[in-house]
Amino acid sequence: MNIVDKIKTIPNLYCLSGCKTNQIKAAQKELDLEFPDEFIDYVKEFGVISFYGTEWTGLNIDGYLNVVDATKNERNLGKDFPQGYFVLENQTIDGILILVNSKGAVYSYQSGNKPVLICKTMTEYLDICLKRNKS
């Protein structure tokens, strides 16, 4: 099941309207990176999502859930923020961020440390989020 179909199965999902290709291209240019296909598919369909207390960044929203704002903010806060990554989720626990690179791999990151690989895809990470929120 692809990421869009899997997200559609989440009960009580909060989402916004999807975004357009030009918005995605503008965001990539502003961040000087390329989003992986899964992230593009996700934001085209949903814009941004929230479920069971999990909030993923995206587009069509202002503030801390906007992927550009969240990533730029973290880059400004920590000069060691890794290049080529963007913020998918701020777990607000011990400064832990969930980052994604242009290949779609998902990492846990804490300022001052190297990113640690969690999953090879956002779909795999979505499964972790769903399990985490059922416990």
Image (cartoon, rainbow, N blue to C red):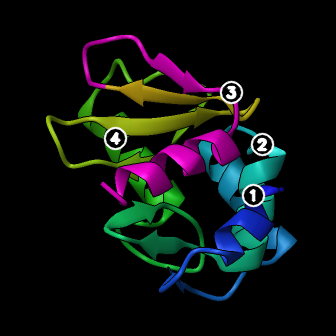
- Answer with left or right where residue 52 lies relative to residue 77: right
- Which residue is disc 1 drawn over? 3
Image point (78%, 72%), residue name = 44
> Which-is-in-front pick, marks 4 and 2?
2
**Is tag 2's residue or tag 3's residue first in the polypeptide sequence?**
2
- Give, as a three-letter code, the residue at label 1: Ile
Regarding mark 2 in the picture, which secondary structure is present there?
loop
Q: Is residue 64 left or right of residue 27?
A: left
Q: Is residue 91 magenta?
A: no
SS at mark 3 in the image: loop
Q: Which residues are magenta?
A: 110-135
Judge left or right: residue 70 versus residue 8.
Answer: left
Q: Disc 2, disc 1: CB below 8 Å?
A: no
What residue lies at 66% left-to-right and 88% top-to-bottom? 17
Going from N to C along the chain, the mark reached first, 1 or 4, is 1
Q: CA distance from mark 4 to mark 3?
A: 22 Å
- Residue 74's label in the rendered image is 4
Mark 1 or mark 3: name the one nearer the start of the chain.
1
> In front: mark 4 or mark 3?
3
Cβ atoms at labels 1 and 4 below 8 Å apart: no
Location of mark 2 (residue): 36
The nearer-to-camera label among 2 and 3 is: 3
Residue position for label 3: 120
Amino acid residing under circle 2? Pro
Say the numbered circle drawn on residue 117: none
